Amino acid sequence: MAKIRHIALSVQDPEKTARFYEEAFGLVRVGTTTSVLADGVYLSDGYINVALLKYKTDEMAGVAGGKDFVGTHHFGFMVEDAEATRRKIEAHGGQFFMDLPALKDTLYYEEKFRDPEGVIFDISGNGWVTEPK
């Protein structure tokens, strides 16, 4: 079975966005790119590669909204201390906007935030199911 190892985000300022994820989550910069497609920064947590890309043309972006599109929809981080992480996120320009569900001790509890570019991400102290039962 294929495993997720790479998530690409379309952003308007790869350096600013990279600094946010480096400072708020401790991701490590593992590379940069300058190509006809996009300029960008690659980060990693040692398991997943995250590409922060600023596409140069609508055609290269290949999505509705073209080179101005910012997004995937969202992705999630499992964290050891959700409250401490929330403080770090907000201290570095992230904004909380929703939590699901109401019971914080359930496996599926997560808090949703937007990074400084508006990209949605979740944090969870419990994580998500990753293996079939």
Image (cartoon, helix red, strand yellow):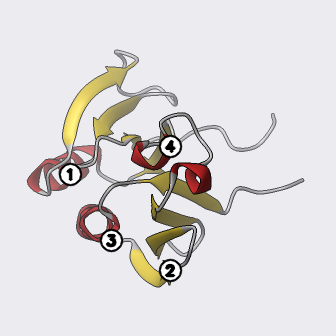
Of labels 2 and 4, earlier in sequence is: 2
Find out whether the residues at labels 1 and 3 contact each other: C-beta distance under 8 Å. no
Residue at position x 58%, y 65% from top? 48
Q: Quick one: label 4 or label 1, which is nearer the N terminus?
A: 4
Mark 4 vs 3, N-terminal side = 3
Residue at image mark 2: 33
Earlier along the polypeptide chain: callout 1 or callout 2? 2
Q: Amino acid at mark 3?
A: Gly
Distance between the alpha carbons at the discs numbered 2 and 4: 19 Å
Q: Check the image and report above or below for 118 versus 17.
A: above
Binning the other alpha carbons within 10 Å of mark 1 as few (below 14), some (14 to 19) or many (20 upward) gives many
What amino acid is at disc 2? Thr
**Of 104 and 8, which appears nearest the observer?**
8
How far apart marks 4 and 1 lie (CA) works out to: 28 Å
Residue holding disc 3: 26
Q: Which secondary structure, mark 3?
A: loop
Tell me the CA gap for discs 1 and 2.
Answer: 26 Å
Question: Looking at the picture, how far across and down is residue 7, in whole percent?
Answer: 58, 56
Disc 4: which residue:
66
Quarter placement of the C terminus: top right
Label 1, label 3: how many angstroms apart (C-alpha)? 11 Å
**Secondary structure beneath disc 2?**
strand
Choose between 34 and 44: the one closer to the eye. Answer: 34
Which is more foreground, mark 2 or mark 4? Answer: 4
Q: CA distance from mark 4 to mark 3?
A: 30 Å
Q: Residue furthest right?
A: 1
Which quarter of the picture shows residue 49?
Answer: bottom right
Q: Amino acid at mark 4?
A: Gly
In the picture of the structure, the residue carrying the numbered disc 1 is 89
